[in-house]
Each structure stands twice: as C-alpha cells, then as structure tokens.
Amino acid sequence: MRKALVAGNWKMNGSLDANRELLSALSGAMQASDAVAVAVCPPAVYLRDALAQLESGAIAVGGQDCSDEKSGAFTGEIAADMLKEVGCEYVIVGHSERRARQHEDSAWVARKFIAAQAAGLVPILCVGEQLADREAGRTDAVVAEQLDAVLDAAGVAAFDRAVVAYEPVWAIGTGLTASPEQAAEVHAFIRARVSARDQGVAEGLRILYGGSVKADNAAGLFALPDIDGGLIGGASLDAASFIGIVNAAVAAQARG
Ligand code: PGA
C-alpha cells in the first residue's frame, strides 16, 4: 500500500514568529506515523529554523523550488544540494505559480526534477491544467505534456523516488476544488500514463491532489483510490486546518 503524503506549501507566507507558533502546534499534534508522511515547505530563508524546530523528525521539510544548475552565477537561485545539505527531504518542482510567473516550461522543470534527485531529494512534481484548457477539453493533453517531459528526460524508473501532485490551476487558492470525480479521472490518467511505461513504478507512485484542499473536503478526496494525499497551500498556514487534513489522510489510510 502506498504511504500517503500530506505536504504544506507555505508559498511566500510566514515570519519567524508565525512559523514558530505554527510548527509548535503541528509538532504537538503529530507523532511520526507509519501510515502517513507529513511535510512542510517554508520559504527558503526559514528552512533552517524550521528544521531546527522539527528535529524530532515526525514532520519532514522541503523546499519550494530548486535550480536546475549545481552552482555558479545564478543570482537568487538555490541548488538542490544546498537544500539537501541543510536537511530537506523534498522539493516542489514545476508549481503552476512558477510556471506562470517565472515562465518555467516543462523541459526546465524536468531538469530541476533531475537535479533534485541527483542531490538525494524527493521531487514533488506539480502538473495541472488552466481553466481554459479544461473548458476546451485539453486537460489530459496538458497533463500528458507536463508529465511526459519529465518521464522522457529522467526515465520512468526515476518516478520510484518522486511524488506527483495534480493541481488544477483553476482550483489553486480560489476556493474551487476539483470534484472528487474530476480529480479521480486525472489521477487515474496520470497513473495509467506512468503504467504504460512501467506498471510497478506506477503502482508505487504517490499522486497528491492540490487545489483548495481544506479539512472539510479532504476526506472525500483522500477516499479515492488513486489519491495518495495532498499538497496544501492556504490551509497549511492554519494549524487546526492542516492537522484536520492530516487526520483525514490517516483515516483514509486506515480504511485502506
Ligand atoms: P491552495 O494551494 O491549497 O491554497 O489552493 C495549493 C498549492 O498551490 O499547492
């Protein structure tokens, strides 16, 4: 059985004080669970403080992005090796906000994915369509392009050390969530696409859902067989909401 992952993507939010408070509430409520892995992805400047506070290891830490380059003249970028060195386990690559604002295309995201794995990090590869794509019936085509770019560049075997997050762009931070049926359809599509290359890798691959996941809609999403946890934005900044989402994942896992 796949071990679910619930990861909080804090985006550009937080402060030393707010983070300390949030993390102490989270670590008070969570023990390391065999059933569900939990991670938080704070802004890079806060990673070291978060890691120091989360020493017990029940909650893992990830970066929100990494460079595709190892080192050198890349002002403002952060190498995957640096994230690994300070103690990160995961790194998000290809988030739709970066694809839009930093114009990251799928080939670039694939290079980041490879750099992350080379450093020993587990990449959380984000894929997802815009509303216009969905309305034009292009959801599968868009997701396939984003996924295939990485499958082609990294090879399917690399996906046994990676996580995919399906995040419909129209559902991110909008309060609109994909219905369980809409999410299930795309998750099944992603797994089938990986399975076409390697069935064993596809069966072990964790595919998270992201996009306005809250404590009250998480159970419905996590109950679906191809949804293996969530990538949580807004609700990960509120301890009670995030804990509620983790508990929904634990309950879903217990039901099998
Ligand atoms: P949201 O963000 O939960 O605020 O919709 C999810 C994400 O962008 O990872």
Image (cartoon, rainbow, N blue to C red):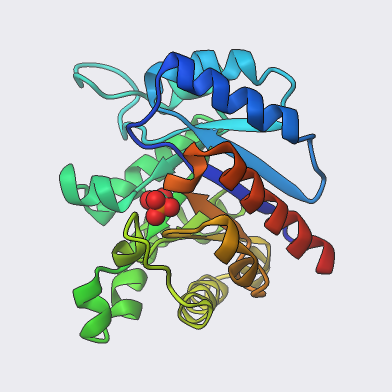
| Above or below, comparing residue 19 to residue 190 in the picture | above
Position in image of residue 235 (x %, y %): 48, 47
Q: Residue at x 42, y 46 (%)?
A: 234
| Above or below, comparing residue 63 to residue 191 in the picture | above
Position in image of residue 207 (x %, y %): 56, 62
Specify whether 49 is left or right of 97: right
Position in image of residue 250 (x %, y %): 75, 55
Residue 85, visible in the rendered structure: no
* Pick the front one: 133 or 178: 178
Specify whether 188 is left or right of 169: right
Q: Residue at x 29, y 72 (%)?
A: 142
Q: Residue at x 44, y 18 (%)?
A: 46
How many marks on residues?
0
Residue found at the very far bottom of the displayed protein: 137
| Above or below, comparing residue 251 to residue 118 in the picture | below
* Pick the front one: 98 or 196: 98
Specify whether 51 is left or right of 255: left
Position in image of residue 185 (x %, y %): 49, 82
Residue 35, visible in the rendered structure: yes
**On-image quarter of the N terminus:** bottom right
* Pick the front one: 161 or 170: 170
* Pick the front one: 255 or 111: 255
- Write down the quadrant of residue 240 in the picture: top right
Specify whether 72 is left or right of 35: left
**On-image quarter of the C terminus:** bottom right
| Above or below, comparing residue 149 to residue 158 in the picture | below
